[in-house]
Amino acid sequence: MPSCRTICHSPRRHYKIMNRRCFIAFFVASLTLSGRNASAKDWPEFCGSHCKNMVSDEKNLPDTFEPGKKNTAKGEIILSTTTNVVWGVRTSANTYSSPTVAGGKIFIGGGEPGRGVFKCLDARNGRVLWQYVAPFRQFPDELEKGLKFMLGHITPNLGICATATVDGDRVYFVNHRCEVMCLDANGSTHPFYISNEIGNTSTNQPPVAPSVRSERVVWTFDLWALGVRPSDACDGQPLVDGDLLYVCTSNGVDRDARVAYADERKTPAPTAPNLIVLDKRTGRLVATDDAQHIGPNLMHGQWSTPSMGVVNGRKLVFFGGGDGCCYAFEALTSVPEKPVKLKTVWSCDCNPPEYKQFGGLSWATHYSLGDKRLRQSLNKNNESSFVGMSEIIACPVFYKDRVYVAIGRDPAHGQGRGALWCLDATKTGDITRSGELWCYQGLDRTLSTVSISNGLLYVGDVAGRLHCLDAESGKCYWVHETNAPIWSSTLVADGKIYLPTTKHLWVLAAGKEKKVLSQVSLGAPIYASPVALDGTLYIGSKNYLWAVRKQEKK
């Protein structure tokens, strides 16, 4: 059985290790910066709110459902074969983004052969109201001679994987073409398309921008033209604050797992920004982060979504870096006339010292050898006991003047030791020591954003385990084995934990005691996080999206 292991640091940095058997649950997200839920009329962004706490106030949600059989010709679920299902529709061939629900509409990205798609659905029946369709961009095959650049080969397998943010009549997202998009969320009900896919694959020059055949596209901002060179995916869930739009750029290092030993290549764009701010009205660049040391120390990808909170009267933006550090930047108070730098308020290295023992190897080599796929991998057994560095992919969650954030890696790299941190958000400077309240090392690498409800924290890991901790102390109450990788985050609502894995949707009772309520197979892996709104649970698999609501038995 796995153990729960928390390292709690007192002012004298006393280490206390607790080993207990555990089982899991998780939660749903809060809709205010303080971590408490506001009116549950919309779920307008990833995690529902700026604080990114995956908790919802929704009630009367079902603890199980029967997803039913598919009518593949029509792309629909046969409702007569379901229970507790209002509707179910095919979304796309690949769906990695989570649904956003606002104004009676559902917004979700995905991919089809040869193109990325972004759909707007009617929340009442799942009918497509309109969709954005664009071909895949022809990125260069290599950025350095002899080193393949895989982005153009990987994005067709992903499509648009960023979750959208809705603000009024505008919807914002990062597409599969390394562009930040602003679309009219209303407008006509007809599909529209982008054409003229042209680009230079032999050089490091940005492809020519496509022509747009619709007034629905308000503006487009090209991250590639800014100098950003993503790894694996163009991601980043935008955060809107007033007239400002904060976006992670996805800048990274394209490490190739097929090489013979280890990939020690450097960041191709070390000076490119990691976090940018745009004028949401025009798409004009107004700010970039001042953390210039992140770029040269990027491990692989950089896909964490920024969060926001008010600390001692000052609004901060929290960002998980691809260098394994968590940052707090001072938020802008207005839209500047000329681009400025976001000021770093504090930073915390989230890789414990013992994770940086490389046995004489460089950190980049050791990082590469921590990938189970590498021919000479040090992690061939794919074990959670493997110790090495990881970046931050999960969202930092702001809750009661604390930030909760975990480290992790691309699930394809396999299992390895993770770390979940509870940080004092009121500190300044390098808070690696001074800001640490507790660190829990009993989990695997993780992509999952934590959920905090009724004093309990829930988080899943790549190994397929869900952990229930005391949010105040980091004490572990239980761990639940699902025996399937977890790519998404749990949702806590109505006293239940909704936990997606690549095999099932688990539903557990929230609380200090583990209780499994149901286990539902959707017939395909689940890569997205669920949403609860208006008494309905929206849950999607790789191909389909269901609206699940408690119904009276016939």
Image: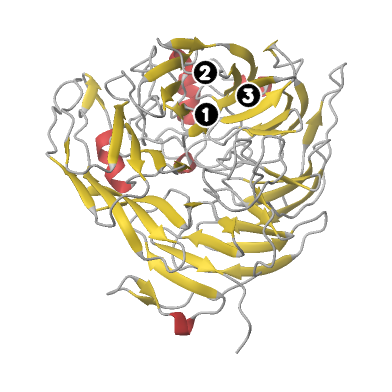
Tag 3: residue type? Asn
The disc placed on residue 361 is: none
Q: Quadrant of residue 514?
A: bottom right
Tell me the CA gap for discs 2 and 3. 34 Å
Which mark is nearer the camera, 3 or 1? 1
Tell me the CA gap for discs 3 and 1. 34 Å
Tag 1: residue type? Gly
Up/down of 459 relative to 532, above or below: above
| Residue 486 falls left or right of residue 11 | left
Tell me the CA gap for discs 1 and 2. 8 Å
Q: Position of residue 408 (x, y in %)?
A: 56, 35
| Residue 201 falls left or right of residue 348 | left
The crowding category of the residue bearing disc 1, from other C-alpha atoms within 10 Å (few below 14, some 14 to 19, many at least 20), is few
Do the numbered discs 2 and 3 sit on residues whose CB atoms are within 8 Å?
Answer: no
Q: Is residue 483 visible?
A: no
Up/down of 40 relative to 175, above or below: below
Q: Residue at label 3?
A: 351
Q: Residue at label 2?
A: 334
Please name the residue shown 34% across and 46% down the image.
158
Q: Is residue 120 visible?
A: yes
Q: Position of residue 423 (x, y in %)?
A: 73, 25
Q: Residue at label 1?
A: 242
Do the numbered discs 1 and 2 sit on residues whose CB atoms are within 8 Å?
Answer: yes
* Residue closest to the eye, 391 or 37: 37
- Mark 3 element type: loop
Q: Position of residue 214 (x, y in %)?
A: 21, 44
Up/down of 324 relative to 293, above or below: below
